[in-house]
Amino acid sequence: MRLQRLVFVGFAVLALGMWSLRADEPTSRPAALEANDVPGLKAAIDSGKLATVDGTIAHAAWSKTGAVMNMEFVNSADSKLMAVIFAKSRDAFDAAFPKDAAVTLAGAHVRLTGKITAYGGKFEAWKDRPQIILTRPSQIEILDPAPATAPAKPNSAPAVDAAWGD
């Protein structure tokens, strides 16, 4: 009887441990890099390991086709770091935030965790630019929400950001 209890308790502890540690979720976040830390971002790309980036999102917008949300950071002109969310993950991100994810994230001070890779897509000007691809809302920690903005005046056109080509 005692052996059965020991086996049962051992199995329960093992099952609980396996349940609490998901393979796709980091058990702890690595020390945060600043979004403008060029050597740190390069080392993160080279290591291929999870990295955490701390910064304020300057721009967050879905592409005209809706295929990808691109985010750029404040004060990252040297590093050119960007974060991206692809359309297949959009519903999960929009459901996780009170508004559309792009609206919630633009202007927010965040901590993002994921692998930092060199951009290898079709835009030649972005080649080798560091990027962090976000696939789950749990990869984002909002440290400070975006400042509230005043509502637009009736009949006023929204501002257009020339850097995004919209």
Image (spheres, helix red, strand yellow):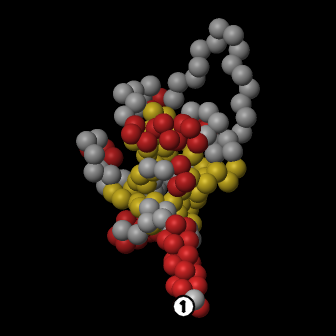
Q: Where is residue 96 in the image (x, y as percent from the top left)?
A: 58, 42
- Which residue occupies the extreme front position in the image? 1
Q: Position of residue 29 (x, y in %)?
A: 55, 68
- Taking 88 as reference, is 35 left or right? right
Q: Residue at x 44, y 62 (%)?
A: 24
One can see residue 82 in this view: no
Q: Where is residue 46 in the image (x, y as percent from the top left)?
A: 35, 70
- Would you place residue 21 above or below residue 54 in this image? below
In front of the other: 25 or 141: 25
Image height of 25 relative to 136, above or below: below
Quadrant including the C terminus:
top left
Total marks drawn?
Answer: 1
Residue 154 makes an appearance in the image? yes
The reply, left or right, for residue 143 in relation to residue 91 is right
Q: Nearer the viewer, residue 28 or 41?
A: 28
Q: Which amino acid does label 1 sit on?
A: Leu
Q: Callout 1: 10 Å neighbours few (<14), some, many (20+)? A: few
Q: Is residue 81 left or right of residue 32?
A: left
Q: Residue furthest top?
A: 155
Q: Which residue is drawn at 41% across and 69% down?
A: 49
Residue at x-position 72% and y-position 22%: 151
Q: Residue at x 36, y 27 (%)?
A: 65
Image height of 161 relative to 45, above or below: above
The residue where tag 1 is placed is 3
- x then y, percent, for residue 137: 53, 49
Callout 1: helix, strand or loop? Answer: helix
Task: Specify the quadrant that holds the N terminus.
Answer: bottom right
Residue 156, by quadrant, is: top right
